[in-house]
Amino acid sequence: MLSTDPDFSSPSKSSHPHHFHSSDSCSSPDLHRPVIGIVSHPGDGASGRLMNGTNVSYIAASYVKFVESAGARVIPLVYTDPLDVIMNKLELVNGVLFTGGWAKKGLYFDVVQAIFKKVLEKNDAGQYFPCYAICLGFELLTMIVSKDNNILEHYGASLQPSTLQFVNNIGVKGTVFQSFPPELLRKLSTDCLVMQNHKFGISPETLQGNQLLSNFFDIITTSTDRDDKVYVSTAKAQHYPITGFQWHPEKNAFEWGYAMIPHSEDAVQVTQNVANFFISEARKSPNRPPAQDVLNNLIYNFSPTYCGKQGKGYDEVYIFT
């Protein structure tokens, strides 16, 4: 009978001295522990089935898992909190994520605008501070940067897997796609590896025709809706570590409510690569807040609620009241 136990007797210690290291060689870990602030969205994420109330807000757990998958933790930025509380929490994080959703006015819009202004101020002051804006988040940045709340156009891209078509004159260096394996990068333009779920967006012509937007964003990719109308699907700020996605990079690995969400190995690799880039950007942030303040505010202080039994919408949400 063959033994399955490892043989530690050969080769000898002396024959391969380079296999053995002083314990001191691993005693200096990377002390940077990146934290991302995610802004909550009005409602309970389940059309009132879980909780009703004017001050209820939520963060889909998929955004939290997305950040965690790349080695960061999350502090919720609850949009109904007093603005000074939100701004204090911004001093505990190394980047911000604006989620998908539907709210485009009122307190939510005002809070997103105030946080985005702070993101720009931090970067202008030399404090590297990245921002991801996904779906609604990107739409809001489009409105804020253009100073035109009516600039968005209607698109038929609800629950639609799609490709990404790269804009030729930009390239991927310095973008979220820079570390993608070449074959996966190629497949993005031929296979439906990303999930779209939006009724609004902005066309390349509108973005490029608006001086405020064209001076702020470069178009990285475009996509087409069910009527073959082209919209900007990925954009990167020219002078800031800010990326806007009209698509949902978090869904491929972490949401199961709709059958059309891509879950292939390639699709999951897209999610992972997009998360990795965001957190690699967050690691450049010089912010090192007091550890106990971070612990006191982490999303681990809350429990997610399972809401996926209906087989639609989100699988899990964090609810704040």
Image (cartoon, rainbow, N blue to C red):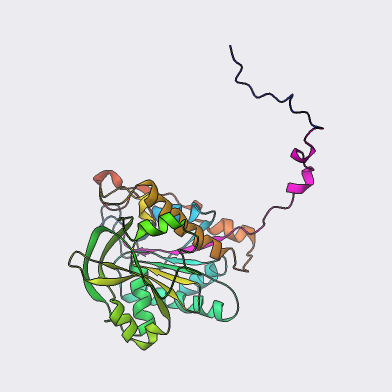
Q: Residue at x 73, y 52 (%)?
A: 28
- Residue 17: where, in percent of width, then height? 79, 38
Q: Is residue 64 visible?
A: no
Q: How many marks?
A: 0
Q: Is 117 left, or right, of 293 in this rendering?
A: left
Q: Does the magenta-highlighted stretch encompass residue 167?
A: no
The relative height of residue 314 versus residue 2 in the rendered view (above or below) is below
Q: Residue at x 49, y 51 (%)?
A: 69
- Residue 195: where, in percent of width, then height? 31, 58
Q: Residue furthest top?
A: 1
Q: Quadrant of residue 110?
A: bottom left
- Residue 240: where, in percent of width, then height? 50, 76
- Residue 306: where, in percent of width, then height? 35, 46
**Which residue range is magenta in the image?**
14-43
Front residue of 232/13: it is 13
Front residue of 169/211: it is 169
Q: Does the magenta-highlighted stretch encompass residue 33?
A: yes
